[in-house]
Amino acid sequence: MIYSDALLTLGALFSVGLLADQVGRRTRVPRVTLLLLCGLAAGWGGLLPDRISSLTDTIMVAALTFVSFLLGGSLKLDSLKAHGIEIIVVSVSIVLVTLALVTLGLTALGTDPALALVLASIATATAPAATLDVIRQSGIDNDFTRSVKGIVAIDDAWGLITFSLCLSVALQMSGSDNGAGVSAFAEIGGALLLGLAIGLPAAFLTGRIEEGEPLEVEALAIAFLTAGLALWLHVSFLIAGMCVGALIANFARHHNRAFHEIEHIQWPFMILFFILAGASLHLPSVMALGAIGAAFIMLRTVARLLGGWLGSALARSAPEHRNLFGVALLPQAGVAIGMALLAGQALPDWKDEIMILTVGATVVFELLGPFCTMWAVRRSASALPPSHNPCTEVHRAPPQDGLPK
């Protein structure tokens, strides 16, 4: 049976995506936020048929896999040589400052230390899809945006490791250690091994076909195989995708076309991703946050700003960029929800508190965070010193999403 409602809905969603892109270009409003708001309205109005809603998880995994490939592709050796110290120092600083400040702040407000530690580890997660899309929409390619892409690429890896350690400590503090920390480390290690198993052969085999449709099929095959195998093996598909992308970018010297194909085909998936993500947002969770929730949001915001400034100062980043890293890295999305689900399963007594705080904070950061990222990216382009090095000059990246510009 052919489902006309599903086809009509897909056509409408893609039309909304095109409209959001054009409005975003004319108003400088992040199209991520526009799509999320459209999804929120569709969810409230019950406009999405069950056949589309049932595909939400699959579409989100596909879209995030494309994002992870592109983020991994940004970790080229020459880029790491130029920005590697900055990427590592800033990302580690943001994670550690967020962990310390949120834990101490929530504990001072009367939250159980074990619960505060878990919530702080969840606060370290970012939103790679939203951050990367804002950078792409801005068209700005400079030292700052390249560093931000590198930080986002490894930030969630640090976050997963931090979450694993903190969850294990919290379980011991609560007297219910069940080995969840060990299984989380196995998930990360397994993802790296899977990335190696797919990425090394792909680096040699891809790009041997003439330009055209086969390259798109090639890119889709690698992305979907990586995501499918990662889910089947219960390892992180984000880390596996980043690993594959990094290996292809660094070892496939005979071409660089595979990532262009992913850039061309990812935008339709991203439209569905952000709209469906918006439809799944639960605004009543924001109302249920209360004083602790407001404190959690404020502490995470201050921690990101302070951690970004401290890390960039230690890495001797350009002075005009030091106040911008934390602002650019405020968005938070699905990774945090995944962490909260795992924490709720491991700590059932605190499941409700963890989910309400995480979902509520995610709604706030997912809707407002892209505005902050856009401001920081545009500020970085206008903050070049008068005698800047021409090698670090701002370039306007060509459009990559296949939409009319």
Image: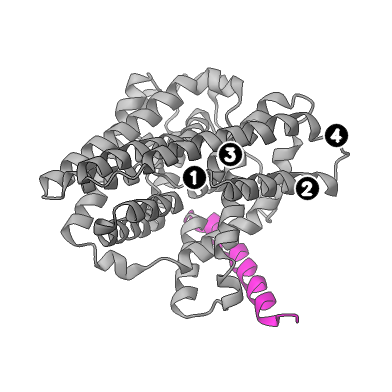
Q: Name the residue under label 2.
A: 216
Q: Where is residue 219 shown, x and y percent of the image?
A: 74, 44
Which of the image's four quarters has the N terminus?
bottom right
Q: Do the residues labelled 2 and 1 touch (CB within 8 Å)?
A: no
Give the CA separation, mark 2 to mark 1.
23 Å
Q: What residue type is labelled 4?
A: Arg
**Residue shown at the point (38%, 44%) measured from the top left:** 180
The quadrant holding residue 337 is bottom left
351 or 323, which is in the foreground?
A: 351
In the drawing, does residue 128 fall left or right of residue 161? Answer: right
Numbered badge on residue 116: none
Numbered badge on residue 128: 1
Q: In this view, does 91 lie above or below 177?
A: above
Q: Is mark 3 on a helix, strand or loop?
A: helix
Q: Earlier in the sequence, mark 2 or mark 1?
A: 1
Q: What residue type is labelled 3?
A: Ala
The mark lying in front, picked from 2 and 3, is: 3
Give the CA separation, mark 4 to mark 3.
23 Å
Q: Do the residues labelled 2 and 3 touch (CB within 8 Å)?
A: no
Q: Mark 4: few, some, or many residues within 10 Å (few <14, many ≥20)?
A: few
Q: Name the residue under label 4.
A: 208
- Which contiguous range is marked in magenta? 1-29
Q: Earlier in the sequence, mark 1 or mark 3?
A: 1
